[in-house]
Amino acid sequence: MIAEGIPNQASYPPLHERDVFRNGSYRERLSGTQKTEQHEFLRGEFPNTKRAAWETYWVPQTALLGDAEDVMEIVEAVRKIQRNASKLAVNAKPS
């Protein structure tokens, strides 16, 4: 996408990997028994969440604020990459 002139931005890390959850400081905002009980959702592996965070292309919002022609340039870049995916994959493999 960058080679096609489409900017990108860093992805957001998976929510469960954020420091606020890892170090427990989120508990300061909880009340009652929630403050001290175990939160099993923090123990999951969440492979789909990780994949979505690290294997997707993030187009900055500013790139999407253009006119219809600008958006079509993004669409055409994606289509070009799709058409050439097998060639790109071969070139991306380490020698």
Image: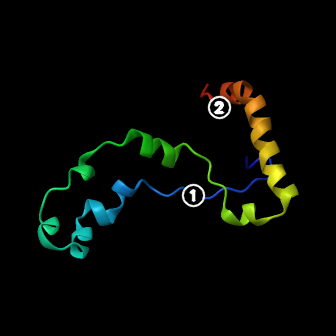
Say few, some or many: other residues with alpha carbon within 10 Å of mark 1 (under 14 / 14 to 19 / 20 or more): few
Residue 72 image position (x, y, % from top left):
83, 50
Quadrant of res 36:
bottom left
Image quarter hosting the C terminus: top right
Residue at 62% x, 53% y is 58
Furthest residue in direction right, as rendered: 69
Earlier sequence position, callout 1 versus callout 2: 1
By what rule are the colours in the image chosen?
rainbow
Residue annotated with mark 2: 92
Give the camera-side residue of 3 and 43: 43
Quadrant of res 39:
bottom left
| Amino acid type of the residue tagged 2 in the rendering | Ala
Give the camera-side residue of 88 and 41: 41
- Give the answer, above or below, for where 36 lies relative to 55: below
Residue at 26% x, 52% y is 42
- Give the answer, above or below, for where 76 lies relative to 32: above
Secondary structure of the residue carrying tag 1 is loop
Give the camera-side residue of 41 and 56: 41
Q: CA distance from mark 1 to mark 2?
A: 20 Å
Give the camera-side residue of 55 and 28: 28
Secondary structure of the residue carrying tag 2 is helix
| Amino acid type of the residue tagged 1 in the rendering | Ala
Residue 86 image position (x, y, % from top left):
70, 24
- The answer to the question of whether label 1 and label 2 lie on touching residues, with beta carbons closer than 8 A, is no
Say few, some or many: other residues with alpha carbon within 10 Å of mark 2 (under 14 / 14 to 19 / 20 or more): few
Residue 27 lies left or right of residue 93; in this view the side is left
Residue 35 lies left or right of residue 60; in this view the side is left
Residue 60 image position (x, y, % from top left):
66, 61
Residue at 31% x, 66% y is 20
Q: Which mark, by number, is residue 10?
A: 1
- Give the answer, above or below, for where 7 lies relative to 24: above
